[in-house]
Amino acid sequence: MDDQLKPVTRTADRERDSALDLLATALAEGRLDAHEHAHRSRQALQARTSAELAALTADLPAPEPSARERDRKDLREWLDEWRYWLGGAVIMSAIWGIDCFRDHELTYYWPLLPLGVWAAVLIAIALWPRNEEKNGS
C-alpha cells in the first residue's frame, strides 16, 4: 500500500550518466570488482526510475568534489559574503543618514570602520593560501 502512495520519478539520461560515473569511480578505487561493476552498470542502463538508480549506488560514498568544483563553490560563497557586506553597508549608511538628518548635521561616517574591517577580512580570505596549497596538495 505504501508503494502506491510514493510518487515514482522517471530517471533521465543525465542521472544515469552520473550513476555510471559513480560506479566507474568505485571500480577505480577498488570498492567494486569488475563483475559487480558490469552488473550494476547494466542495471543502471536499464533503470526506469530514480529509486532503481539510487539503489545501485546507495552503498557507495559520494565522490570527492574536484578542485574546480571546490574553487567554484568557494568563489560563490565569497561573492555571497560581499553581498552581505553590501547589505550591511546599506543598513549602516541608512542609520548614519537618519542620524545626521535628525541632528541637522553631517557627522563622522562611523560605518567606515566596521565596513573597512569586514572588507579587509574578505580581501584577506581571497589572498590567503588555503590549507591544501600550504601542504603542497
Image (spheres, rainbow, N blue to C red):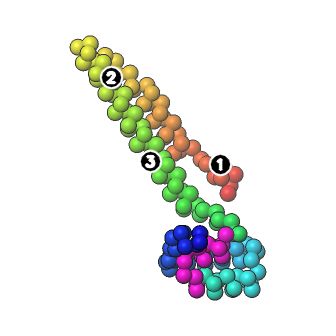
Give, as a single range, the part of the protein colored magenta.
Answer: 45-58
Give the residue at x 74% y 77%: 32
Task: Using a 10 Å C-alpha cutoff, classify the residue at mark 2 as few (fewer than 14 neighbours), some (14 to 19) or many (20 or more).
Answer: some
User: Is residue 46 highlighted in magenta?
Assistant: yes
User: Residue 116 or 89: which is nearer the viewer?
Assistant: 89
Find disc 3 in the rendering and name its residue.
79
Label 1 close to label 2 by CB (< 8 Å): no
Give the residue at x 60% y 62%: 65
Give the residue at x 63% y 52%: 133
Find disc 1 in the rendering and name its residue.
131
Task: Using a 10 Å C-alpha cutoff, classify the residue at mark 3 as few (fewer than 14 neighbours), some (14 to 19) or many (20 or more).
Answer: few
Q: Residue furthest front?
A: 1
Of the image marks 1 and 3, the number of the one nearer the N terminus? 3
User: Residue 120 or 98: which is nearer the viewer?
Assistant: 98
User: Which residue type does callout 2 highlight?
Assistant: Trp
Q: Is residue 87 above or below residue 15?
A: above
Find disc 2 in the rendering and name its residue.
96
User: Which residue type does callout 1 highlight?
Assistant: Asn
Separation of residues labelled 2 and 3 (CA atoms): 25 Å
